[in-house]
Image (tube, grey):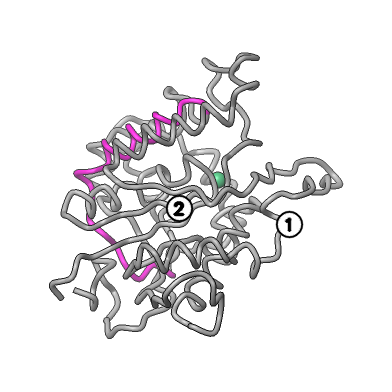
Amino acid sequence: MSEQLRLMAVHAHPDDESSKGAAAMARYAAEGVEVLVVTCTGGERGSVLNPKLDRPEVWENIATIRRAEMDRAREILGVDQAWLGFVDSGFPEGDPLPPLPEGCFGLMDPEEAAAPLVELIRRFRPHVITTYDEEGGYPHPDHVMTHKVSMVAFDAAGDAARYPDAGEPWQPLKLYYNMGWSRVRMLALHEAMLETTGESPYTEWMKQWEERPDKGDRVTTRVPCGEYFEARDDALRAHATQVDPDGFWFAVPLDIQQKIWPTEDYELVKSHVDTRTPEDDLFAGVR
Ligand SMILES: [Zn+2]
């Protein structure tokens, strides 16, 4: 295939692209693939998670600040990015859980919310789309809705009878779920940290995880991208309101990650091309 390859990564909030599949995207972009990050919401209801930026003027301007952070992350990863313009649902907390705010992304009808994504797919014409699994990867209502609209849009974009006003039909060839945060990967990093330094930042996490099923056995595709872990971390740090630069995310040295788990991992969910799993390339069968 001599045609320009294109990858679309659908995410819920600005910052999600930098913690899920960022190194693989940076690698594909560096190799000449056109990469478009689609951000469903503006992250307007996100908290300030970096204690160094937890100030009233930051909270007041969070939407504007997060757009600027996204611009910086996009530049670092070498990708393009588009906003779908939906409103962040926030992460409901409490018992009982409060209702989601009116008009937010998480409350939308997936068929209706998929319309701008269908239009974008028909315009960008990706060969491969990545999104979240049926549980959203983690149970944020915007992540679950991101999954739903991606599934609707992947099938509808190639069907001229659906969304007839959204442009010329285009059928993407493969759909993947991000599977980077499997227990098996965290355990491997946890054990490597214990072995090298005597302590692990994941000790508490690994204990909590014992009750949850691991999705590691769903991984079909491991994309080598260790060289781009630094770019991934730089992009994540660019979302300065959302991550503590001295925190958990950056606690495992890059050389340990590159040695122990030098890939980003995915589950192939839909394919219109012949490919055999396990794969090491999202474009296997497309090239
Ligand atoms: Zn998110």
Badge 1 residue CB within 8 Å of ligand 1: no
Of the residues shown, which amino acid type is indicated by label 2? Val
Specify whether 21 is left or right of 152.
Answer: left
Q: Name the residue at the left extreme.
A: 2
The answer for how far apart the CA atoms under marks 1 and 2 are is 19 Å
133 or 155: nearer the viewer: 155
Badge number at residue 38: 2
Q: Residue at x 39, y 64 (%)?
A: 123
Residue 153's spot in the image, x, y percent? 52, 70
Q: Which residues are magenta?
A: 218-241
Residue 51: say if magenta: no
Residue 236: say if magenta: yes
79 or 275: nearer the viewer: 79
Q: Name the residue at the front extreme.
A: 165
Residue 207 in sight:
no
Residue 40 in sight:
yes
Of the residues shown, which amino acid type is indicated by label 1? Leu
Q: In terms of secondary structure, where does tag 1 sit?
A: helix
Q: Residue at x 58, y 46 (%)?
A: 41
- Callout 1: 10 Å neighbours few (<14), some, many (20+)? some
Q: Residue at x 58, y 39 (%)?
A: 43
Q: Residue at x 48, y 29 (%)?
A: 243
Residue 168's spot in the image, x, y percent? 42, 75
> Label 1: which residue?
107
Q: Name the residue at the right extreme.
A: 96
* As drawn, 152 above or below 46: below
- Callout 2: 10 Å neighbours few (<14), some, many (20+)? many
Residue 225's spot in the image, x, y percent? 23, 51
Q: In terms of secondary structure, where does tag 2 sit?
A: strand
Query: For the N terminus, which image quadrant?
Result: bottom left
